[in-house]
Amino acid sequence: MIESDTTTTNIATIFRATRKLHRLQQTEIAAILEVTQGTISKVESGNMHPELGLWFKLLKSFSISDPYCFTYGGLEFNENTFSNLEKEGSPFLPLYRFTGENTLFSARTLRPIFEYLLKTHFKALETFLKEKKVALELFYVLNHPIPVEFAEAFFIFLHDNKINDKSLSHLNLSFASAYGAFSNNVLKTNSLEVFFDILNKEKDAIAKYKYDNNSQTYTVTLNKKSQNKMNQIQQKDSIINYNLLFPYYYLKSTKQSKMINPKIVEVKKNVEWKIAYAS
């Protein structure tokens, strides 16, 4: 591992998020990883860089998929990790319920905005999360399901802080922490088709995307299960628009091409949207 302040901070967050999601005390995770509680405390506080053996033991013990996740400060667990959410809830969102009908997308979707808020609206974000009893670590577990009620509350918070569809299109959001190694793959191949393929593999995405290279447009179709969920949300338009323009925000952030703001050029029965942009 490369020793740096960012890497150490990322590792500390990953250890904390892993422990808290599994409802473990430091002594308990220390026993699992066969180290002392003092070692865990130092790692979580950013005062110690773990040895490679400890890092890989964490990955294996808790089914963390990417061994290089410390480079971008996000992690994904095996799907079995979330199998008991409906019955037990999540320690990261104790006030919210989880069912198949009540989850909208994963934390990865909100991570780029979260990164922006950390830099520009940290105090307001901290107050908002404290009021909702939501743990900051939520945004670092990229495949953690997001319930409908919290998604709506989050977008109301954005609206209250004057972060709307128009302002988002002008922001330079960072997607490196949300897509990690995938972002590097897209940049290396310089292929938009690869990027849209990655987007469509997201299990909890509320939409599917199809790119047309000839017309420089992409089509967005809401998943059928998402349509019913949207009907109960006051912030429906904001949430849909953010997902409509998600590929644009990403491509802009990676400077894949010189694009002007996209334009919705076709709507079909409020289900399918065609997005056009010019290079």
Image (cartoon, rainbow, N blue to C red):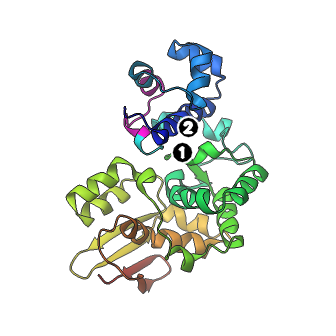
Up the image or down, 264 lies above or below 119; here it is: below
- Locate the N terminus by quadrant: top left
On the rendered structure, is 187 left or right of 152? left
The residue where tag 2 is placed is 13
Is residue 116 highlighted in magenta? no
Residue situated furthest right in the rendering: 131
Residues in magenta?
A: 57-70
Disc on the earlier residue, 1 or 2: 2
User: Residue 21 location in percent, x, y?
Assistant: 60, 34
Q: What residue is disc 1 on?
A: 140
Q: Could you say where residue 61 lies in the image, as x and y percent from the top left?
A: 46, 22
- What is the three-letter code of the residue carrying label 1? Tyr
Element marked by disc 1 = helix
Crowd around label 2: few <14 · some 14–19 · many ≥20 (10 Å): many
Q: Do the residues bearing badges 1 and 2 touch, measured as CB atoms within 8 Å?
A: yes
In this orientation, which residue lies closer to the viewer: 73 or 210?
A: 73
* Residue 262 visible here: yes
Q: Residue at x 72, y 71 (%)?
A: 160
Please name the amino acid that badge 2 sits on: Thr
The quarter holding residue 221 reads bottom left
Q: Nearer the viewer, mark 1 or mark 2?
A: 2
**Which residue sits furthest bottom?**
265
**Front one among 90 and 186:** 186
